[in-house]
Amino acid sequence: VQLAESGGGLGEAGGSLRLSCEVSGGMSEVYVLGWFRQAPEKEREYVAILPSKWYRGNVHYADSVKDRFTVSRDAATDTVYLDMNSLKAEDTGVYYCAARRGVSIYYAPDQFTSWGQGTQVTVSS
């Protein structure tokens, strides 16, 4: 499966941005999809995990983004979105979309086998 992120850029604190992850080479619903981010000089961290269709559960969000970020999927275009609201300066980083086959939910980046190229998000305070 191939992943391609888009939509990053410069946002203001308190503002909003939408990231897109276009999935190709496989149906997104059979994969566990994750949004991760990496700030300068920090390790890559999970932002949100969208379960595959076989998992009876909701999207998992990191505490740092809960109630601010929302993941959704457009099945028609096989695109996954990350809507980021109430942006904070600490949301700055490169955001990645990642995928792994299966049902189990993992939060560690090394559990994901396919990655997009990343898109830069910069939030000015």
Image (cartoon, rainbow, N blue to C red):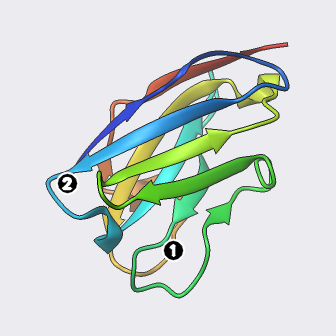
Classify 100 as above or below 94.
below
Tag 2, which secondary structure?
A: loop
Q: Is residue 27 visible?
A: yes
Instruction: Name the residue located 40 percent from the left edge and 81 percent from the top edge.
Output: 103
Classify 57 as above or below 2.
below
Q: Which residue is mark 2?
A: 1
Residue at the far front in the pictured view? 76
**For the residue carrying disc 1, how many other residues have a C-alpha within 10 Å: few (<14), some (14-19), or many (20+)?**
some
Alpha carbons under labels 1 and 2: distance apart: 18 Å
* Foreground of the two, 85 or 64: 85
Residue 50 lies, in percent from the top left, at: 51, 64
Tag 1, which secondary structure?
A: loop
Residue 55 lies, in percent from the top left, at: 47, 84
Q: Quadrant of the C terminus?
A: top right
**For the residue carrying disc 2, how many other residues have a C-alpha within 10 Å: few (<14), some (14-19), or many (20+)?**
some
Cβ–Cβ under 8 Å for marks 1 and 2: no
Q: Quadrant of the N terminus?
A: bottom left
Q: Amino acid at mark 1?
A: Ile
Residue 22 lies, in percent from the top left, at: 32, 43
Instruction: Name the residue located 58 percent from the left edge and 54 percent from the top edge.
Output: 71
Left or right side of 38 for 21: left
Q: Amino acid at mark 2?
A: Val
Instruction: Name the residue located 34 percent from the left edge and 69 percent from the top edge.
Output: 29
Question: Which of pointers 1 and 2 lies earlier in the amino acid sequence?
Answer: 2
Residue 105, disc: 1
Residue 45 lies, in percent from the top left, at: 61, 45
